[in-house]
Image (spheres, grey):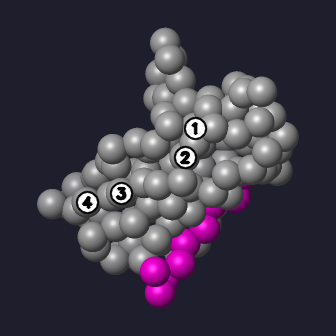
Amino acid sequence: QVQLVESGGGLVQPGGSLRLSCAASLSIFSANSMGWYRQAPGKHRELVADITGVGITKYADSVKGRFTISRDRAKNTMYLQMNSLRPDDTAVYYCHATFTVAAYWGQGTQVTVSS
């Protein structure tokens, strides 16, 4: 069982920044892909950004140019740098990892963008 632990969420004003972290119990570079999803109240969970094992990234149109996904091999951690945050970015953000045999979710971290 792979454990994914998110951190870094919180309350931020519109226009502000946050950096989410996802620490894994297995090497993140052995994953086929890793990503960040979010779920706002009353809405379906949606992909925010993901990164393949070879480092190819993909972003939802709504976050392009504002969010950046990255990985740190030494810390075995994936990040989501979120800039120019907007109220509609408010959601629970989940870390996700796909390995050859299974996929895993983190427990989620709340991000609230409000003045």
Query: Where's residue 78, x and y in %?
Result: 50, 66
Seen from this angle, which residue lies furthest left?
1
Between 64 and 111, the one lying in front of the other is 111
Q: Is residue 33 left or right of residue 98?
A: right
Mark 1 is on which residue type? Val
Q: Tag 1 or tag 2, which sits nearer the N-term?
A: 2
Task: Label 2, secondary structure: give it.
Answer: loop
Range shown magenta: 67-75
Q: Are marks 3 and 4 in contact (CB under 8 Å)?
A: yes
Mark 2 is on which residue type? Gly
Mark 4 is on which residue type? Gln
Q: Tag 1 or tag 4, which sits nearer the N-term?
A: 4
Q: Are marks 2 and 1 in contact (CB under 8 Å)?
A: yes
Tag 4 residue = 3
Mark 3 is on which residue type? Val
Q: Are marks 2 and 4 in contact (CB under 8 Å)?
A: no
Instruction: Report if residue 109 is visible in the image.
Output: yes
Tag 1 residue = 111
Q: Give the vertical position of 81 relative to 71 (above or below).
A: above
Res. 97 mark:
none
Res. 9 mark:
2
